Image (spheres, helix red, strand yellow):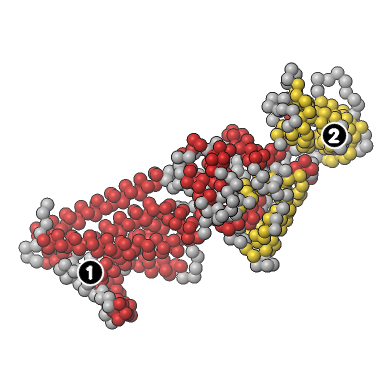
Amino acid sequence: MLDVQVRKQRGAFSAQVAFRSATPGVTALFGRSGCGKTTTIHMIAGLLRPDRGHIRIGETVLFDAAQGIDVPAEQRGIGYVFQDARLFPHLTVRDNLRYGARRARGRAAHLKFDDVVELLGLAALLARRPAGLSGGERQRVAIGRALLAQPRLLLLDEPLAAIDVARRGELLPYLEDLRDRLSLPMVFVSHQFEEVLRLAGEVVVLQEGVVAGHGDVIAMSQSAALRAIVGAESLGAVVEGLIEQVDESSGLAQIRVGAGKLLLESAQLRRGQRVRVQLLARDLILATAAPVGLSVRNTLAGTITRLEADGERAWLVFIDTGGVTLMVRVTADAHSALALAVGQPAWVLVKTVSLRGRVFSR
Amino acid sequence: MLLSADEWQALRLSLEVALWSLLWNLPVATAMAWVLVRRRFPGRTLVDALVHLPLVLPPVLTGYLLLILFGARGPIGGWLQRSFGVHLIFTTAGTVLAVAVMTFPLMVRAIRLTLEGIDTGLEEAARTLGAGPLDRFFSITLPLMLPGILAGAVTAFAAGLGEFGAVITFVSNIPGVTRTLPLALYTALQVPNGDATAARLAITSFTLGLAALVLSEWLSRTLRNQLGRGTAHA
């Protein structure tokens, strides 16, 4: 358990952040820039001293203002992957990687040099200097360097921010691998909800220095706190499930969602795999009668549980489909034409192709 | 070009004095530059000004101040003499001190410039990897300061070869003991038949100075390129 409860005043900005997250596990600190995300992980790392509060990992107290405990950053054993990588320019990649390993202070070497090199695909870079590396390569080296210091917690500050948008996809699989293969607790900072969806189990939503919401990603995907931050375009309920079957001939895979099922394009999916799917509210179609004769493969029946105005011209309709809530955005016009009301039966139509790029393996 | 025995002696002495003052200055100037860049303390501006004072004061005045402080009856000089038997006045050791004080600001300036260009974020990264303060300094900061330290060292060495005013005021002009190149040159200009000697010494000084500046420039460029200047973590 990572237990953070800190306060920090920096000029006009004040941060008051409290959350507890499961370890091992991946927690995302999510929010707009300037909301206190980086300030928070700086305090966890020990690079910034909170004015008040405490920081604990399990039984270990790293900071406690009341007890006067403040373990120096160099003794905390917390890995930190900075947004700008911060590789040492005078050292080769190999020596950068070994820097932390040499200073691991007797912590058991769970992570071996060769394994980390293999995990992050660094073999070809070892003899090179940081100046010649691409943004993605630098981040991978920075992650490897932090891992080899044998940390008890890994902090990542927007690890993808310094990389070209087009090349971010190259680093994400490495991060997913890290999450799946090491049982290392991670806290990462992001302002891209898609990264949160791909990597995190829990999300802490920060707004203007305070925690606006905290919970597992699926529950949080529909929270008002999150909605206030992600744009209308990337808003959508998240569902998680096991691939129950894969049909090679139709190229479709099936997961269970509440009482219904959802067909996904099966490329790269296999039976038994756990996936997370985001159903974007703007991509879903709502019907108030059971539809017939449509090309849409996915129809999920349910009941309207809530209606919320989303700006002036749109409504968000929450539909419970056997224990799983989905969100559909409809125009204000559709809302009144269909006379939508809570308790009404409804059918949600999902185009399988609209899920392309929204399916993430867990 | 052949130098006479006296001229060789002056050249050798100059090289020796410049080298010794450089060796004294290296650690002190590095520490001073680090303190001035990385530490905030009351009186920092005053310390900064004191360090740079020899650059702007007439060298004769610096020599005179040294005389007051380090002379046989001066507060520091007297103590050194009583406690350690160290004589600075009219000695080569005194010459080294005068040259060291005069070239100190040059070294501090050069080192400071590179240090200011080093992102403190690198030291933060080293901290999170388990490096304590001294460890960080020696494994990260110092290696990155190296271009500035070397460039500063070469410049200070070259300037040290030619220091005149402070030396002649503080330790006088004694052949073989305190008579460095510029003092020998000055002496040659004072005697009726010294023209040839003066010319040879002038050419020697000129060549040494030029070589040092070229070397300094080359060193700092080479080292900076090796670090992949600027792209370190853009």
For this rendering, which residue is in front, A126 or A217? A126
Instruction: Mark yes or no: residue A85 visible.
Output: no
Instruction: Mark yes or no: residue B138 visible.
Output: yes
What chain letter is assigned to the residue under label 1? B
Query: In the image, what residue type sits under mark 1?
Result: Thr
Which residue sits at x=29%, y=50%? Answer: B215
Residue A284 lies, in percent from the top left, at 80, 30
Which residue sits at x=78%, y=34%? Answer: A241
For this rendering, which residue is in front, A243 or A161? A243
Indicate left or right for A88 with A50 as reference: left
- Residue B92 marker: 1
Indicate left or right for A96 with A172 as reference: left
Residue A17 lies, in percent from the top left, at 71, 56
Q: Identify the residue position indicated by label 2 in the image.
A: A258
- Tag 1 secondary structure: helix
Image quadrant of residue B186? bottom left
Residue B14 lies, in percent from the top left, at 21, 62
